[in-house]
Image (tube, grey):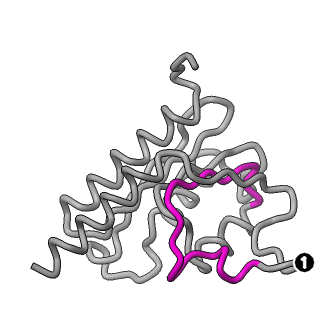
Amino acid sequence: MDFSVFSDEHYMKLAYKEAVKAAEKGEIPVGAVVVCGQKIVAKAHNETETLQDVTAHAEILAITAASNYLGAKYLTECTLFVTLEPCLMCAGAIAWSQLKRLVFAAHDPAKGFTKWQTGDNHILHLKTELSTGLMAGPCKLLIEDFFRDMRN
């Protein structure tokens, strides 16, 4: 496979860089990038500690920034790349923003939204395409290392 700056891998690597920024600030290392028409319209990482705001997850911050940049509340032509499976709160925001695609790396069996999505119970917007597992290893390792370092 040829590498392209317009590939999912490229955008997930940028989300990973955002996650590293979060870790360096003592935040849970989750990063997000919103792409619309092959253009990056928003990048963010967790800032719950920095902002003292439990809703300041990378996905929420990225969706807000993308909406502001595009001047639109719906992101129907955009893709969100995120290093960790979104929580239920973030999945709700993804559904309301009507993202075209969601691509997340590592699953979060404890807090991830797919734990709540069963049968006909769709959390995401019905038109949102879902892809998972891209760069799951490095993204999961970043989270595991962060929490291991916190315990020591």
Residue 84 locus on image (x, y percent): 48, 62
| Residue 152 on the magenta span | no
Q: Name the residue under label 1.
A: 120
**Element on which disc 1 rests:** loop
What residue lies at 58% left-to-right and 29% top-to-bottom? 7
| Residue displayed at 47% across by 53% down | 136
- Residues in magenta, as a range: 98-117
Indicate whether 96 appears above or below 81.
below
Front residue of this view, candidates 36 and 142: 142
Residue furthest to the left in view is 152
Nearest the camera: 103 or 64?
A: 103
State which quadrant residue 91 falls in. Answer: bottom right
Please state the horizontal and vertical placement of residue 55, each as a whole percent of the image: 47, 79
Q: Quadrant of residue 94?
A: bottom right
Q: Residue at 70% of width from left, 83% of height from top?
A: 116
Q: In this view, does 141 lie to the left or right of 1?
A: left
Residue sitting farthest toward the right:
120
Q: Image quadrant for the N terminus?
A: top right
- Kind of residue at disc 1: Asp
| Nearer to the camera, 50 or 145 | 145
Quadrant of the rendering where the C terminus is positioned: bottom left
Q: How many labels does the image show?
A: 1
For this view, does 94 lie left or right of residue 51? right
Q: Residue lying at the far top in this picture: please name it.
A: 2
Residue 127: x, y in percent? 86, 56
Mark 1: few/some/many CA within 10 Å (<14, 14-19, 20+):
few
Residue 113 in magenta stretch? yes
Residue 119 in the image, given as x and y percentages of width and height: 86, 78
**123 horizontally vs 12: left or right:** right
In the rendered image, the vertical position of residue 5 relative to residue 13, given as above or below: above
Query: In the displayed structure, does residue 120 sit left or right of residue 76?
Result: right
Residue that appears at 38% across and 48% down: 16
